[in-house]
Image (cartoon, grey):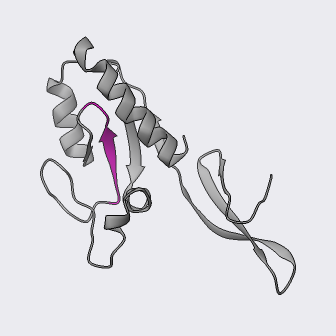
Amino acid sequence: MVTREGKTLPLGRIQVQCGFDSRSGHNLLIKTKNMAKIVENEKGFRLIEVSAEEMREIHPEMRGADWFPICDSCASGGLEKGVYVAVLNRWLCPKCCEKWYSAAVRYPEDARIEERNFNRYKEIIGL
């Protein structure tokens, strides 16, 4: 494992951020968390399962103490994880994602924007 101060390293399904303790002279594990994952599906939509904590890290406006995760569709709150739907550019709770997916049709003319959104979030999240 390569450890560099402030560097975030994906290790399988765990993400580790390492740092250096100047007092002891040792590399330190600062935090670990579950990483987002790409959701494969039969319709070919670009989906990423991502935790509320990871969404906070992506969007600075979500870092305040008064922010809590809500679904972009039903507005239910207190979610621990959801699914980023690239074609919609929305974060949905699992229930709304299933509802949307059951009726969704993938249109070729949406592919360019979907791919752009997906690649942007994939890069930000580190997938």
Q: Position of residue 24 (x, y in %)?
A: 86, 84
**Left or right: where 108 falls relative to 12:** left
Q: Position of residue 31 (x, y in %)?
A: 61, 68
Q: Find the residue positioned furthest to the bottom.
A: 23
Any part of residue 105 in sight: yes
Q: Position of residue 69 (x, y in %)?
A: 27, 62
Give the magenta-colored segment's residue range: 80-87
Q: Quadrant of residue 30?
A: bottom right
- At 61% across and 53% down in the image, what residue appears? 14
Any part of residue 46 in sight: no
30 within the magenta span: no
**The C terminus lies in which quarter of the figure?**
top right
Q: Position of residue 50 (x, y in %)?
A: 40, 49
Relative to residue 76, is residue 98 depicted above or below?
A: above
**Left or right: where 30 falls relative to 34:** right
- At 35% across and 60% down in the image, what residue appears? 80
**Left or right: where 93 falls relative to 126:** left
Relative to residue 88, is residue 18 depicted above or below?
A: below
Q: Quadrant of residue 45?
A: top left
- At 18% across and 43% down in the image, what residue appears? 96
Q: Quadrant of residue 32?
A: bottom right
Q: What predominant SS class does the magenta segment belong to?
A: strand
Q: Name the foreground residue: 120 vs 107.
A: 120
- At 51% across and 41% down in the image, what residue appears? 123
Relative to residue 21, is residue 126 depicted above or below?
A: above
